[in-house]
Amino acid sequence: MYILGMETSCDETSVAVVRAEGNALKIEANIVASQIETHRLYGGVVPEIASRAHIEAITNITTEALGAAGITLKDIGAVAVTAFPGLIGALLVGVNFAKSFAYANDLPLVAVNHIKAHVAASYLGENPPKPPFLALVVSGGHTSLFDVTDYTDFHEIGATRDDAAGEAFDKIGRVIGLPYPGGAALDRLAREGNVGAIKLPSPALGGETLDLSFSGLKTAALNYINHCRQQGIEVPRADLAASFTDAVVEGLARKTEQALDQTGHSTLVMAGGVAANSHLRARLEALCKKRGVTFTVPPVSLCGDNGAMVAAAGYFEYRKGNFADVSLNASALDHIEA
């Protein structure tokens, strides 16, 4: 069957067509209308602008996705849409469009959790994982560890108590003058710096908890930047990028290893926008190799927000009979229970 996936949770409007046969998924089309250049003018996402851009793009890219997949409306088996969590105005655009589209074409509608969709992106790559497994979701808005017992059953076992890792990367990148999105630029700059040049606190909380906190790390980095500027000293951007990245990566690796110990899982799936970070990929790959754990991460092209991951997650919700109707509403909050 063919699943039409729609994603508008933040600043990417995306519609995709995924073909499903059993547990095997294949992307037939994945159209993404990025707003990066628009939001770069402001140094970050402006919710109202994002919502309006989604309205302008979604009809055209839906048509484009169907054309790229070489199918017609009669070939679609279900419509999946990101309903939560995310920017409420942006989500409402996708949810209302998907409801109208499904209703007008007499198609089943499936509501998708954005975080589950990121994990589902791993089902679209080579050697897709099969539950149960441990999932680390790291993005601009989320940083969580999940015990995934089935394709649709997630239990949060650890999370950030404040800022997300991606938000911290973007903030520090912006403050030292890197272009938006700061996280990607910081990743590249970190390769040029000395990891041990600047001492920064770990975001990994002490004890048995699997939680993290990035606010202290971010504050420490900002204080260092301000101190340099007050003293008239040029901020060593490459060294700061390397030291900050190392603190984030090592903190995530520490809690991920603890989670592997606690759950006993033999597979780790990493997903989300920050899963594209080269340093984090290398560190977790090395960790899994050392422990004999299978490490799975989506292709970089599927780490960011996209409709294909929504279609993939929606397919498994469809198989469970988890359908939505025209009363479906968007929510800025996560619906995964801790």
Image (cartoon, rainbow, N blue to C red):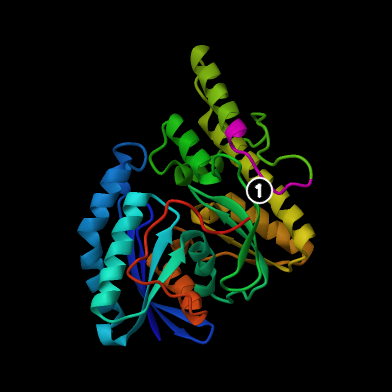
Mark 1, Cα crowd under 10 Å, few <14 / some 14-19 / many 20+, is: many
Choose between 50 and 238: the one closer to the eye.
Answer: 50
Q: What SS does tag 1 mark?
A: helix
Choose between 315 and 171: the one closer to the eye.
Answer: 315
Q: Looking at the rendering, which quadrant does residue 39 occupy? A: top left
Choose between 233 and 293: the one closer to the eye.
Answer: 293
Q: Residue at x 38, y 58 (%)?
A: 330
Name of the residue lying farthest toward the top: 231
Q: Residue at x 52, y 79 (%)?
A: 320
- Which quadrant of the figure contains the C terminus? bottom right
Q: Is residue 52 left or right of residue 287?
A: left
Residue 9 location in percent, x, y?
A: 38, 55
Residue 189 location in percent, x, y?
A: 50, 40
User: Per the image, is 269 magenta?
Assistant: no
Q: Residue at x 45, y 43 (%)?
A: 185
Q: Is residue 108 left or right of residue 216?
A: left
Segment colored magenta: 208-217
- Which quadrant of the figure contains the N terminus? bottom left
Looking at the picture, which amino acid does disc 1 mark? Answer: Leu
177 versus 292 height, above or below: above
218 versus 15 height, above or below: above
User: Per the image, is 214 magenta?
Assistant: yes
Residue 236 location in percent, x, y?
A: 54, 27
Q: Which residue is mark 1?
A: 252
- The answer to whether any part of residue 176 appears in the image is no
Choose between 326 and 208: the one closer to the eye.
Answer: 326
Q: How many marks?
A: 1
- The answer to whether any part of residue 211 appears in the image is yes
Q: Looking at the rendering, which quadrant does residue 196 occupy? A: top right
Overall secondary structure of the magenta section: loop
